[in-house]
Image (cartoon, rainbow, N blue to C red):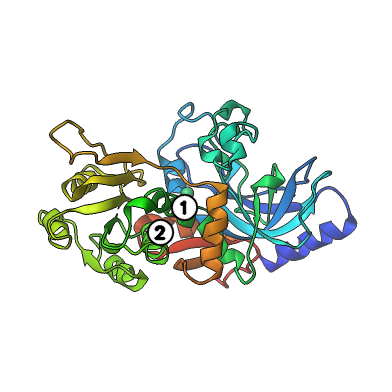
Amino acid sequence: MTWVHAWRRSAVRRTGTKEALMQALRLMAWKSEPELVEVEDPLPADGQVVVRIGGAGACHSDLHLMHDFDAGLLPWGPPFTLGHENAGWVHALGPGVVGLEIGQPVAVYGPWGCGRCQRCRLGIETYCDNPLGAPVPGGGGGLGLDGGMAEFMLVPDARHLVPLPAGLDPVIAAPLTDAGLTPYHAVRRSWAKLPPGSTAVVIGVGGLGHLAVQILRATTAAQIIAVDNRPEALQLASECGADHTMAPGDTTAAAIRDATEGRGADVLLDFVGADDTLALGVAAARMLGDLTLVGIAGGSLPVSFFSVPYELSIQSTYWGSRPELIEVLDLGARGLLRPTITTVPLDQAVEGYRRMEAGTVEGRTVVIPGAPSAVH
Ligand SMILES: [Zn+2]
Ligand SMILES: [Zn+2]
Protein backbone atom coordinates (compact mmCIF):
# COMPACT_ATOMS: atom_id res chain seq x y z
CA MET A 1 0.00 0.00 0.00
CA THR A 2 1.34 3.41 -0.88
CA TRP A 3 1.35 6.20 1.65
CA VAL A 4 -1.02 8.24 -0.49
CA HIS A 5 -3.40 5.33 -0.63
CA ALA A 6 -3.15 4.77 3.11
CA TRP A 7 -3.96 8.43 3.68
CA ARG A 8 -6.96 8.31 1.36
CA ARG A 9 -8.26 5.20 3.05
CA SER A 10 -8.10 6.71 6.48
CA ALA A 11 -9.84 9.81 5.11
CA VAL A 12 -12.64 7.63 3.77
CA ARG A 13 -12.89 5.82 7.08
CA ARG A 14 -13.17 9.06 9.02
CA THR A 15 -16.22 10.13 7.04
CA GLY A 16 -18.05 7.08 8.32
CA THR A 17 -19.46 6.20 4.91
CA LYS A 18 -19.80 2.60 3.77
CA GLU A 19 -17.33 3.14 0.95
CA ALA A 20 -14.19 2.08 2.80
CA LEU A 21 -12.04 0.25 0.30
CA MET A 22 -9.07 -2.03 0.66
CA GLN A 23 -6.54 -3.49 -1.71
CA ALA A 24 -6.81 -7.20 -2.36
CA LEU A 25 -4.76 -9.62 -4.44
CA ARG A 26 -7.42 -11.34 -6.49
CA LEU A 27 -7.42 -14.14 -9.01
CA MET A 28 -9.70 -12.59 -11.63
CA ALA A 29 -9.76 -15.51 -14.12
CA TRP A 30 -8.31 -18.99 -14.51
CA LYS A 31 -4.94 -19.21 -16.28
CA SER A 32 -3.87 -15.73 -15.22
CA GLU A 33 -1.73 -13.97 -12.65
CA PRO A 34 -3.58 -12.39 -9.73
CA GLU A 35 -4.21 -8.65 -9.73
CA LEU A 36 -4.12 -6.03 -7.01
CA VAL A 37 -7.58 -4.46 -7.07
CA GLU A 38 -9.74 -2.39 -4.75
CA VAL A 39 -12.66 -4.07 -3.03
CA GLU A 40 -14.98 -3.00 -0.24
CA ASP A 41 -14.01 -3.78 3.31
CA PRO A 42 -15.93 -6.86 4.46
CA LEU A 43 -18.67 -6.50 7.08
CA PRO A 44 -19.50 -9.44 9.36
CA ALA A 45 -23.05 -10.87 9.34
CA ASP A 46 -24.50 -13.15 12.03
CA GLY A 47 -21.87 -15.49 13.43
CA GLN A 48 -19.11 -14.09 11.20
CA VAL A 49 -15.82 -12.44 12.09
CA VAL A 50 -13.60 -10.00 10.21
CA VAL A 51 -9.88 -10.59 10.80
CA ARG A 52 -7.24 -7.91 10.23
CA ILE A 53 -4.55 -9.90 8.46
CA GLY A 54 -1.08 -9.95 9.99
CA GLY A 55 0.30 -12.49 7.53
CA ALA A 56 -0.95 -14.53 4.56
CA GLY A 57 1.23 -17.38 3.32
CA ALA A 58 1.82 -17.85 -0.40
CA CYS A 59 1.44 -21.54 -1.20
CA HIS A 60 2.62 -23.55 -4.20
CA SER A 61 -0.96 -24.66 -4.70
CA ASP A 62 -1.75 -21.02 -5.54
CA LEU A 63 0.53 -21.42 -8.56
CA HIS A 64 -1.59 -24.39 -9.63
CA LEU A 65 -4.67 -22.17 -9.26
CA MET A 66 -3.05 -19.59 -11.55
CA HIS A 67 -1.85 -22.01 -14.21
CA ASP A 68 -3.55 -25.38 -14.24
CA PHE A 69 -7.31 -25.01 -14.02
CA ASP A 70 -10.02 -24.28 -16.55
CA ALA A 71 -13.62 -23.34 -15.91
CA GLY A 72 -15.60 -26.33 -14.69
CA LEU A 73 -12.74 -28.38 -13.26
CA LEU A 74 -13.45 -27.22 -9.70
CA PRO A 75 -16.84 -26.54 -8.11
CA TRP A 76 -15.74 -22.92 -7.54
CA GLY A 77 -13.75 -20.33 -9.41
CA PRO A 78 -12.56 -16.74 -9.75
CA PRO A 79 -12.83 -13.98 -8.93
CA PHE A 80 -11.66 -14.38 -5.34
CA THR A 81 -8.89 -13.03 -3.11
CA LEU A 82 -5.95 -15.42 -2.75
CA GLY A 83 -4.40 -16.50 0.55
CA HIS A 84 -5.43 -19.68 2.41
CA GLU A 85 -2.76 -19.54 5.17
CA ASN A 86 -3.85 -16.70 7.40
CA ALA A 87 -3.39 -15.20 10.84
CA GLY A 88 -4.01 -11.79 12.32
CA TRP A 89 -6.22 -10.05 14.85
CA VAL A 90 -9.98 -10.08 15.42
CA HIS A 91 -11.20 -6.82 13.87
CA ALA A 92 -15.01 -6.97 13.94
CA LEU A 93 -17.56 -9.44 15.30
CA GLY A 94 -20.91 -10.19 13.70
CA PRO A 95 -24.06 -10.43 15.83
CA GLY A 96 -24.10 -13.47 18.08
CA VAL A 97 -20.35 -14.13 18.15
CA VAL A 98 -19.12 -14.75 21.68
CA GLY A 99 -15.78 -15.88 23.07
CA LEU A 100 -13.57 -13.64 20.94
CA GLU A 101 -12.26 -10.15 21.77
CA ILE A 102 -11.49 -7.34 19.34
CA GLY A 103 -7.73 -7.24 18.83
CA GLN A 104 -7.22 -10.86 19.91
CA PRO A 105 -4.56 -12.63 17.80
CA VAL A 106 -5.96 -15.61 15.90
CA ALA A 107 -5.08 -18.12 13.22
CA VAL A 108 -7.67 -19.00 10.59
CA TYR A 109 -8.34 -22.72 10.16
CA GLY A 110 -8.45 -22.88 6.36
CA PRO A 111 -10.63 -25.83 5.26
CA TRP A 112 -14.27 -24.84 5.64
CA GLY A 113 -16.79 -27.69 5.68
CA CYS A 114 -20.50 -27.81 6.40
CA GLY A 115 -19.95 -27.51 10.17
CA ARG A 116 -22.68 -30.01 11.00
CA CYS A 117 -21.57 -33.47 9.84
CA GLN A 118 -19.69 -35.84 12.12
CA ARG A 119 -16.30 -35.03 10.55
CA CYS A 120 -16.81 -31.30 10.84
CA ARG A 121 -17.90 -31.65 14.48
CA LEU A 122 -14.64 -33.48 15.11
CA GLY A 123 -12.80 -30.57 13.48
CA ILE A 124 -11.82 -32.62 10.41
CA GLU A 125 -13.39 -30.18 7.96
CA THR A 126 -10.95 -31.26 5.24
CA TYR A 127 -12.97 -34.45 4.94
CA CYS A 128 -16.47 -33.00 5.35
CA ASP A 129 -19.14 -35.58 4.47
CA ASN A 130 -21.50 -32.90 3.19
CA PRO A 131 -19.40 -30.62 0.98
CA LEU A 132 -22.50 -29.23 -0.73
CA GLY A 133 -23.41 -27.78 2.67
CA ALA A 134 -20.09 -25.92 2.92
CA PRO A 135 -19.66 -22.25 1.89
CA VAL A 136 -17.98 -23.60 -1.26
CA PRO A 137 -17.54 -27.36 -1.81
CA GLY A 138 -13.99 -28.43 -0.96
CA GLY A 139 -12.74 -24.84 -0.69
CA GLY A 140 -12.47 -22.00 1.77
CA GLY A 141 -10.93 -18.57 2.15
CA GLY A 142 -8.42 -18.13 -0.69
CA LEU A 143 -9.87 -21.21 -2.39
CA GLY A 144 -13.03 -19.98 -4.04
CA LEU A 145 -13.92 -17.49 -1.30
CA ASP A 146 -11.98 -14.37 -0.39
CA GLY A 147 -8.74 -15.18 1.44
CA GLY A 148 -6.18 -13.25 3.41
CA MET A 149 -4.18 -11.35 0.79
CA ALA A 150 -5.95 -8.14 1.76
CA GLU A 151 -6.03 -5.95 4.82
CA PHE A 152 -9.19 -7.67 6.09
CA MET A 153 -10.67 -11.14 5.64
CA LEU A 154 -14.23 -12.25 6.27
CA VAL A 155 -14.36 -15.56 8.16
CA PRO A 156 -17.85 -17.06 7.79
CA ASP A 157 -17.96 -18.75 11.18
CA ALA A 158 -16.16 -18.07 14.44
CA ARG A 159 -15.37 -21.80 14.78
CA HIS A 160 -12.65 -21.39 12.13
CA LEU A 161 -10.59 -19.12 14.41
CA VAL A 162 -7.98 -20.58 16.74
CA PRO A 163 -6.57 -18.14 19.35
CA LEU A 164 -2.80 -17.79 19.06
CA PRO A 165 -0.79 -18.95 22.06
CA ALA A 166 1.15 -16.19 23.84
CA GLY A 167 4.24 -15.07 21.98
CA LEU A 168 3.38 -16.48 18.57
CA ASP A 169 3.60 -13.77 15.88
CA PRO A 170 0.83 -13.92 13.21
CA VAL A 171 3.57 -13.76 10.54
CA ILE A 172 4.90 -17.09 11.86
CA ALA A 173 1.45 -18.52 12.60
CA ALA A 174 0.13 -17.88 9.06
CA PRO A 175 2.25 -20.49 7.24
CA LEU A 176 1.82 -22.90 10.15
CA THR A 177 -1.90 -23.13 9.27
CA ASP A 178 -1.05 -25.02 6.06
CA ALA A 179 2.70 -25.50 5.51
CA GLY A 180 2.89 -26.60 9.18
CA LEU A 181 -0.49 -28.28 9.59
CA THR A 182 -0.25 -30.43 6.44
CA PRO A 183 3.02 -32.21 7.35
CA TYR A 184 1.92 -32.35 11.01
CA HIS A 185 -1.21 -34.29 10.04
CA ALA A 186 0.85 -36.60 7.82
CA VAL A 187 3.40 -37.29 10.57
CA ARG A 188 0.86 -37.56 13.40
CA ARG A 189 -1.20 -40.29 11.70
CA SER A 190 1.97 -42.43 11.57
CA TRP A 191 3.15 -41.75 15.15
CA ALA A 192 2.52 -45.37 16.16
CA LYS A 193 5.07 -46.49 13.55
CA LEU A 194 7.76 -44.08 14.73
CA PRO A 195 9.09 -45.41 18.05
CA PRO A 196 12.79 -45.24 18.99
CA GLY A 197 14.69 -47.36 16.48
CA SER A 198 12.41 -46.46 13.59
CA THR A 199 13.26 -44.38 10.52
CA ALA A 200 11.28 -41.66 8.77
CA VAL A 201 12.17 -40.39 5.29
CA VAL A 202 11.19 -36.91 4.07
CA ILE A 203 11.26 -36.66 0.28
CA GLY A 204 11.33 -33.02 -0.88
CA VAL A 205 12.60 -30.40 1.58
CA GLY A 206 10.60 -27.33 0.51
CA GLY A 207 8.08 -25.21 2.41
CA LEU A 208 6.35 -28.27 3.88
CA GLY A 209 9.25 -30.72 3.93
CA HIS A 210 11.56 -28.62 6.10
CA LEU A 211 8.74 -28.33 8.65
CA ALA A 212 8.13 -32.10 8.42
CA VAL A 213 11.72 -32.65 9.56
CA GLN A 214 11.18 -30.29 12.51
CA ILE A 215 7.87 -31.99 13.40
CA LEU A 216 9.48 -35.44 13.31
CA ARG A 217 12.30 -34.14 15.51
CA ALA A 218 9.89 -32.48 17.98
CA THR A 219 7.30 -35.27 18.26
CA THR A 220 9.05 -38.61 17.59
CA ALA A 221 12.30 -40.40 18.35
CA ALA A 222 12.72 -41.66 14.79
CA GLN A 223 15.92 -41.42 12.81
CA ILE A 224 15.25 -38.85 10.07
CA ILE A 225 16.52 -39.07 6.49
CA ALA A 226 15.89 -36.17 4.08
CA VAL A 227 16.04 -36.51 0.29
CA ASP A 228 16.25 -33.56 -2.13
CA ASN A 229 18.21 -32.78 -5.28
CA ARG A 230 19.16 -29.24 -4.13
CA PRO A 231 22.24 -28.99 -1.89
CA GLU A 232 20.81 -25.94 -0.10
CA ALA A 233 17.63 -27.89 0.72
CA LEU A 234 19.71 -30.68 2.24
CA GLN A 235 21.62 -28.08 4.25
CA LEU A 236 18.29 -26.74 5.53
CA ALA A 237 17.17 -30.29 6.38
CA SER A 238 20.32 -30.80 8.45
CA GLU A 239 19.71 -27.52 10.28
CA CYS A 240 16.13 -28.65 10.98
CA GLY A 241 17.34 -31.89 12.57
CA ALA A 242 17.74 -34.53 9.84
CA ASP A 243 20.22 -37.27 10.77
CA HIS A 244 21.11 -38.08 7.15
CA THR A 245 20.62 -36.21 3.88
CA MET A 246 20.72 -37.70 0.40
CA ALA A 247 20.27 -36.65 -3.20
CA PRO A 248 17.75 -38.73 -5.17
CA GLY A 249 19.25 -41.19 -7.62
CA ASP A 250 19.78 -44.82 -8.52
CA THR A 251 21.50 -45.64 -5.24
CA THR A 252 19.27 -43.71 -2.84
CA ALA A 253 16.97 -46.59 -1.90
CA ALA A 254 20.02 -48.76 -1.18
CA ALA A 255 21.52 -45.99 0.93
CA ILE A 256 18.30 -45.76 2.96
CA ARG A 257 18.39 -49.54 3.48
CA ASP A 258 22.03 -49.23 4.55
CA ALA A 259 21.03 -46.61 7.11
CA THR A 260 18.33 -48.95 8.49
CA GLU A 261 20.32 -52.18 8.78
CA GLY A 262 18.68 -53.42 5.60
CA ARG A 263 15.11 -53.12 6.87
CA GLY A 264 13.96 -50.06 4.99
CA ALA A 265 12.20 -47.00 6.35
CA ASP A 266 9.12 -47.29 8.56
CA VAL A 267 7.47 -44.11 7.32
CA LEU A 268 8.11 -42.25 4.08
CA LEU A 269 6.56 -38.84 3.44
CA ASP A 270 6.58 -37.77 -0.20
CA PHE A 271 6.24 -33.98 -0.48
CA VAL A 272 6.83 -34.10 -4.24
CA GLY A 273 4.49 -36.78 -5.53
CA ALA A 274 6.18 -37.50 -8.87
CA ASP A 275 6.53 -40.94 -10.47
CA ASP A 276 10.18 -41.24 -9.45
CA THR A 277 9.73 -40.03 -5.85
CA LEU A 278 6.88 -42.51 -5.33
CA ALA A 279 9.02 -45.27 -6.83
CA LEU A 280 11.82 -44.32 -4.42
CA GLY A 281 9.35 -44.49 -1.54
CA VAL A 282 8.33 -48.05 -2.39
CA ALA A 283 11.91 -49.15 -3.00
CA ALA A 284 13.03 -47.83 0.39
CA ALA A 285 9.99 -48.90 2.47
CA ARG A 286 9.91 -51.49 5.22
CA MET A 287 7.21 -54.15 5.43
CA LEU A 288 4.27 -52.84 7.53
CA GLY A 289 5.43 -49.30 6.82
CA ASP A 290 3.56 -46.18 5.69
CA LEU A 291 4.11 -44.36 2.40
CA THR A 292 2.24 -41.06 2.55
CA LEU A 293 1.68 -38.94 -0.54
CA VAL A 294 1.41 -35.22 0.25
CA GLY A 295 2.90 -33.51 -2.82
CA ILE A 296 0.64 -32.75 -5.76
CA ALA A 297 3.02 -33.31 -8.69
CA GLY A 298 0.49 -35.82 -10.02
CA GLY A 299 2.70 -38.91 -10.31
CA SER A 300 1.30 -42.41 -9.95
CA LEU A 301 2.43 -45.71 -8.56
CA PRO A 302 1.61 -49.20 -9.79
CA VAL A 303 0.52 -51.43 -6.92
CA SER A 304 0.48 -55.21 -7.27
CA PHE A 305 1.05 -58.20 -5.01
CA PHE A 306 4.69 -58.37 -6.05
CA SER A 307 5.52 -54.67 -6.49
CA VAL A 308 5.30 -53.30 -2.94
CA PRO A 309 6.50 -54.56 0.48
CA TYR A 310 3.92 -56.61 2.41
CA GLU A 311 1.44 -54.49 4.35
CA LEU A 312 2.94 -51.23 3.21
CA SER A 313 0.09 -48.74 3.62
CA ILE A 314 -0.04 -46.16 0.85
CA GLN A 315 -2.21 -43.09 1.35
CA SER A 316 -2.65 -39.53 0.31
CA THR A 317 -3.37 -36.87 2.92
CA TYR A 318 -4.86 -33.41 2.58
CA TRP A 319 -4.23 -30.51 5.01
CA GLY A 320 -5.18 -31.28 8.65
CA SER A 321 -7.78 -30.93 11.38
CA ARG A 322 -8.61 -28.01 13.66
CA PRO A 323 -7.47 -29.85 16.84
CA GLU A 324 -4.17 -30.56 15.06
CA LEU A 325 -3.82 -26.86 14.25
CA ILE A 326 -4.05 -26.11 17.98
CA GLU A 327 -1.15 -28.53 18.51
CA VAL A 328 0.88 -27.05 15.63
CA LEU A 329 0.49 -23.54 17.03
CA ASP A 330 1.67 -24.81 20.41
CA LEU A 331 4.82 -26.20 18.76
CA GLY A 332 5.27 -22.84 17.04
CA ALA A 333 4.85 -20.81 20.23
CA ARG A 334 7.43 -22.99 22.01
CA GLY A 335 9.98 -22.55 19.23
CA LEU A 336 9.90 -26.23 18.25
CA LEU A 337 8.49 -25.37 14.84
CA ARG A 338 10.25 -22.47 13.11
CA PRO A 339 9.28 -21.90 9.48
CA THR A 340 11.88 -20.20 7.33
CA ILE A 341 10.05 -17.13 6.05
CA THR A 342 10.53 -14.42 3.41
CA THR A 343 8.09 -11.52 3.85
CA VAL A 344 6.74 -9.26 1.10
CA PRO A 345 4.24 -6.36 1.23
CA LEU A 346 0.92 -6.86 -0.54
CA ASP A 347 1.82 -4.74 -3.57
CA GLN A 348 4.82 -6.99 -4.24
CA ALA A 349 2.93 -10.26 -3.81
CA VAL A 350 2.72 -10.97 -7.57
CA GLU A 351 6.48 -10.64 -7.78
CA GLY A 352 6.74 -12.86 -4.70
CA TYR A 353 4.81 -15.60 -6.50
CA ARG A 354 7.07 -15.21 -9.55
CA ARG A 355 10.15 -15.68 -7.38
CA MET A 356 8.50 -18.68 -5.72
CA GLU A 357 7.83 -20.21 -9.11
CA ALA A 358 11.44 -19.60 -10.15
CA GLY A 359 12.58 -21.36 -6.99
CA THR A 360 14.61 -18.39 -5.77
CA VAL A 361 12.80 -17.82 -2.46
CA GLU A 362 14.17 -19.10 0.80
CA GLY A 363 11.43 -20.86 2.78
CA ARG A 364 7.82 -19.75 2.79
CA THR A 365 6.74 -16.42 1.29
CA VAL A 366 4.41 -14.57 3.66
CA VAL A 367 2.50 -11.52 2.41
CA ILE A 368 2.04 -8.76 4.97
CA PRO A 369 -0.90 -6.57 3.86
CA GLY A 370 -0.26 -3.75 6.34
CA ALA A 371 3.46 -3.39 5.56
CA PRO A 372 4.56 -0.23 3.75
CA SER A 373 5.88 -0.78 0.22
CA ALA A 374 9.57 -0.73 -0.45
CA VAL A 375 10.69 2.50 -2.12
CA HIS A 376 11.10 1.88 -5.84
ZN1 LIG B 1 -1.62 -24.50 0.53
ZN1 LIG C 1 -19.19 -31.35 7.19
Position above or below: 197 against 241: above
Q: Where residue 118 sits: x, y (%)? A: 59, 33
Q: Amino acid at mark 2?
A: Gly
Going by the image, does 14 lie left or right of 279?
A: right
Determine which residue is flagged by label 1: 59
Q: Which residue is mark 2?
A: 207
Q: Nearer the viewer, residue 83 or 170?
A: 170
Q: Quadrant of the C terminus?
A: bottom right
Residue 189, percent from left and from top: 41, 48
Would you say the beta carbon of the disc 1 residue lies within 8 angstroms of ligand 1? yes
Front-most of residues 86 and 165:
165
Please tell me which residue is depicted at 72% across the width and 66% down the height of the picture: 4
Residue 43's spot in the image, x, y percent? 78, 46
* Rendered-image quarter of ligand 2: top right
* Left or right side of 31 for 330: right
Q: Is residue 304 above or below residue 65?
A: above
Instruction: Name which residue type carries label 1.
Output: Cys
- Counting residues from the N terminus, which is met first, the one under dot 1 or under dot 2? 1
Examine the rendering and report whether any part of residue 83 can be seen. no
Q: Residue at (45%, 39%) from the top-left corner?
A: 31
